[in-house]
Amino acid sequence: MLSLGGITVSIIAFVFTIKFLCELAARVVSFLQNDDPARHGDRSIYDYVRGNYLDPRSCKVSWDWKEPQEVGQTMSFRVQLFYKNGQPFPAHRPVGLRVNITHIELALEVPVTQEVLQEPESNVVKVAFTVRKAGRYEVAVKLGGLNVAYSPYYKIFQPGTVVPSKTKIAYHFSTLVLTYGQQHTLQIEPRDEYGNPTSNSVSLVDEVNYNMHVHPLGTVDEESSDDCYSTSVSLNKPQCQVLMRLTFRKKGCFRACISYRDQPLSNGEFDIIVLSENEKNCVEKNVSTPGISIYFEAYLYSMGTYSSCPWQFLASSQLALQRRPSMGDDEEEQDSPVEGQSEKVKKPKKVYCYISPKQFSVKEFYLKIIPWRLFTFRVCPGTKFTYHGPDPVHKYLTLVVDDGIQPPVELSCKDRNIMAATFIRFLHKNIGGSETFQDKVNFFQRELRHIHSKRPRTKTCLKVSRHSLLESSLKATRNFSVSDWSKNFEVVFQDEEASLY
């Protein structure tokens, strides 16, 4: 029995000895491979044998917040430094602590600050940072190139509360053309202070706070403006959107403002033109046949007359498009003052407004046969329409056209709403159905790919001079057609053997 017990003790002692020698060998190898050569003078193998060295795996990380947290707040966590033997390591000594915080989807790095806490926690380094983009982040904490404890860590930050100045309407238009009695859906994209979609946030359960205020343009009596439309709001979480369904029960021109908790959205103010079914069909016919000259009879007013007239809004009667200018005599103009006006109204000039997919022109005719162009505006988002009530002479609804380059033009037209809706439809077709920059970029790229898919991919040779690259390139391509620009270019430099493709 004694011999058996002695053998057992010997085996146990042998196992512990082997374990100690293996750990000692591992520490020596770690010292030789991982220690910074510049710091060999501060440490020795004896320190490694005793475990008197900073060990990344023995360090600990503690978080100063509980998940989930919203973006925009200053977050912090603590790194506790320890020797291999479990004793606290003084953090004021240079340890080479590296902290990298990266947004996984966007590959964005977040700046961090490090602060060494004083006694009694001299072995603690406090790391602070602020994230502004919602999503999943990787937090990598390293000492001397080795991960600390269970690094890297993964943390999720949610978007913040809805900020009206950052919230936008998708596919936004400065003027919206609707049809009487038909429902239209506006797609609202809620955003927080840093532009994050907020539909995944716990704070976005308040779609009831979205409201829409509408008032007729050019009218004095607005008591019944709330009865001319109806709205309903719903939440579409998968698409990160709030859907506002709008239905008008009255024709005319209106100014709308969408707000969140009584604060307007960034692009929440816009005009609305409500057409009847016949007026809508007339606009569709104009847009579908752009080769035919589309024009409207109108009256041109001077700036002084326009600004001094207290015009009032009148309900528009059934409007019809004038396909060609009337050859009859003009209506008798009125020079007598209207009610409530102290001075005479100047006689307006009869003109014709032509609309094409590219431009909006105002012309007059001398002797009723000789055209003379007075103004020309491009069909682009820079050309703005302002809607007013009826003019003091003919009682036609008024429109102000301004592109910011030439003086504004004031026109009164019997078919003003049809004319404005035709212009807007041409504009939307030109820019892809939205006035926002990103939608324009997507439309341009889509059209570019569509055009290139129909063009041949043959090569065309360009001979240019390296010393006058710009001038020679312009000279070589000045007569290129659309099909030529779609070809692959083979660039040959004059007096050189090399070429580029």
Image (cartoon, helix red, strand yellow):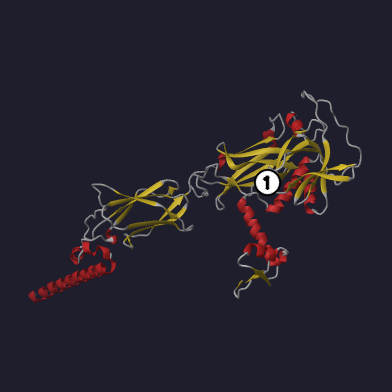
| In the displayed structure image, the side of residue 235 where residue 75 appears, left or right | left
Q: Position of residue 297 (x, y in %)?
A: 83, 41
Which residue is depicted at the point 90% across and 42% down? 368
- Please provide percent x and percent y for residue 186: 63, 46
**Residue 6 in the figure: left or right of residue 478:** left
Which residue in the rendered view is the most extreme toward the right?
A: 328
Q: Residue furthest left?
A: 2
Q: Evaluate whether residue 209 shows in this view.
A: yes
Q: Residue at x 84, y 26 (%)?
A: 336
Circle 1: residue type: Gly
Q: Quadrant of residue 177?
A: top right
| Front in this rendered view, residue 20 or 99 | 99
For residue 47, side relative to residue 438 (left or right):
left
- Which quadrant holds the C terminus? bottom right
Relative vertical location of residue 82 with respect to residue 14 in this rendering, above or below: above
Q: Secondary structure at mark 1?
A: loop
How many marks are shown on the rendered structure?
A: 1
Q: Identify which residue is drawn at 30% across, 56% down.
A: 60
Residue highlighted by disc 1: 382
Quarter assignment of residue 395: top right
Judge by depth and name the residue closer to the eye, 317 or 298.
298
Query: Quick check: 93 above or below 493?
Result: above
The quadrant of the image that shows the N terminus is bottom left
Q: Residue 144: percent from the left, percent from the top?
A: 31, 62
Q: Can I make out residue 35 in this image?
A: no
Sort mark 1 into few (<14), some (14-19) or many (20+) by Cα contacts within 10 Å: few
338 in relation to 2, above or below: above
Looking at the picture, how far across and down is residue 386, in whole percent? Answer: 71, 39
